[in-house]
Image: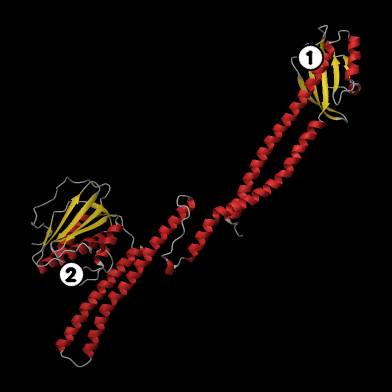
Amino acid sequence: MKRLSIRVRLTLWYTLFFMLLLVVMGSLVLWRVHSHLVENADRALAEEINELFEEMQLVSDQDKLVEELERRFSTHSHYHFEVLDEDLETVFASPFLTHIELPPADRPGKMRGAQYAEVELAGLGHYRVMNLAVRDASSRPLLLRAISPRLLIDRDFQSYVWMFATMGPIAILASLLAGYLVAGHVLSPIKRITSKAKSISVDRLDERLPVVHEFDELGELSTTLNETFDRLENSVDTMRRFTSDAAHELRSPVAVLRTEAEIALRKPRLLEEYRAVVESTLAETIRLGDLVDQLLTLSRHDAGVEKLLTDEVPVGALLSDVVSRCDATAKKKGVELVADTFPDCFINGHDVWISQLFFNLIDNAIKFTPAGGRVSVSVDLDAAQAHFKIRDSGVGISADHLPHVFERFYRVDASREHYRGTGLGLSICKSIVDAHHGLIDVSSVVGEGTTFVVSLPLNASEDTPTEGAGEQLAGEPSESVAS
C-alpha cells in the first residue's frame, strides 16, 4: 500500500485538529446561546409576573381582583397565567389553562424566591413555567404562575444550529485548502533540497544544498547534509589519491623488475651478472611485498575488518621488547639507542597493533639518524594517559612538511630522498593511534632532529605512579637494550 505524502498527511492532521477545535468551540457557543435564550425567556416570564403582581396590588377586593385579571390577562400574547391561594385552589386562570392541569407546586407560604421548570403538555409541546409566592393587598399568600411555550426558544436555537451546520462543512473545506497550501509552502524548501540532492553525484561532490533559513529546522537539515557531503567529498578525494598513489608506488618496483629482467635476457651473461640481477630483483620484490602488506594493513583498518581488541596490554613491557628488537639495527648503523626504565602500565587495546606502532616510530627514527646520532625513548604518565616520546638527532623535517607527514605516500624534502620507503609507515601509526582513541604529535627542527609523542589512554583501573618514577640518567642504556 502506497503511503500518503507528508503534505497530504499534514493537511489531514491540520484538518482533523481544526474539526475538533470547531466541534468544541461550536458546542461551547451553542451551549452558551441556549443558556442565553433560556435566560431571556425566564426574564420575560419574570417581567410578566411582576406586571400581574402590580395589577393585583391595586385591587384589594377579591371579586374585583378576578374581574380585573380576566379583563387584563385572559389573553396576553403567548403568556398564560394562574393564581392559586394558600390551599392551591385556583383564584384565576387564563382560558388556556382552564382545562389543563399543571404539575403541582409548593404552598406559597413555604416557597422562597422564584422557581422555574420545564413541563410537557400533552399534544401541546414543551412549556417554560415560573412559580412565584407573593402576598396580595390583604397580605394573603398567593402563588402566581406563568407559562410560555418553548417553541420560540427552540426555533431560535435551531436557527443557530443550522447556521453552524451550514458553516461547518464550508469551514472544513476551507481548512483542507488552507492546510494543503500551507503544508506545500512549508515543505517547498524540502523539494528544493531533494531536487538538489538528486543532482549531486560522485562527479559533482563539490555542489551543496541551499540553506534558506540557517536557524530553523530545514536550515539545520541542509547544514547537516552539507557537512555530510563535505566529509563524503574528503573521503572520496582521499580514496582517489590513495588509489592513484598506490598505483604509482606499485608501478615503480614492477617497472624495475621488468627492466632488470629484460636487460638480463638480452644476451648471455656471466654468473656474477645474473646474481646481481637476482639480488636487485629480490630487493625490489621485498620492497614490493612490504608495500602490499602496508596497503593491506591500511585497507583493513579503514574497512574495519580487523576489530580492535580490548585486552589489557602491558605497554611498558611491550615497548621494552620493541626497543630490544630495534637495538641490533641501531648498532649496525652506528646509532645510539637509549631508553628509560619503563613503568608498569596497562592500556586497553590490540598488542600487535601497539607493537607495530612503536616499531615503526623507532625504526623510522633510526633510519633518519646518521651514524653517531642518538635515538631516545621515554614514557611519562599522568592521571589518565601515558605519553610515549621517541626523539632522534637526525636530519629533521622542515615546518612546511610537518602537517603532512601522516598523509599516505607523502614524502618530505630532498634531504631525505635517499632513505627509501613506501610513505605509509606514519599513516599506519596514525591509524593505530586513532583506533585506540589516542593522539600522536610531531615536532622537528631541520638538522637537529625530530620528536614524536604518542598519548594513549590508560586502563581505568590503573594507578598512576609517582612523578619521575623509573627515570634514569640521559645517555645511560636500560637493561632492555643490549650493550
Quarter of image, res 237: bottom left
Could you tell me residue 413's position as x and y percent? 20, 69
The quadrant of the rendering that contains the N terminus is bottom right
The quadrant of the rendering that contains the C terminus is bottom left
Residue 143 makes an appearance in the image = no
Ranked by sequence position, the earlier of labels 1 and 2 is 1
Could you tell me residue 98's position as x and y percent? 91, 21
Quarter of image, res 395: bottom left
User: How many C-alpha atoms fall within 10 Å of the one at disc 2: few (<14), some, or many (≥20)?
Assistant: some
- The foreground one among 459 and 63 is 63
In the picture of the structure, the residue carrying the numbered disc 2 is 416
Q: Amino acid at mark 2?
A: Arg
Which mark identifies residue 133? 1
- Element under label 2? helix
Q: Is residue 268 above or below residue 228?
A: below
- Element under label 1? strand
Q: Is residue 378 above or below residue 117?
A: below
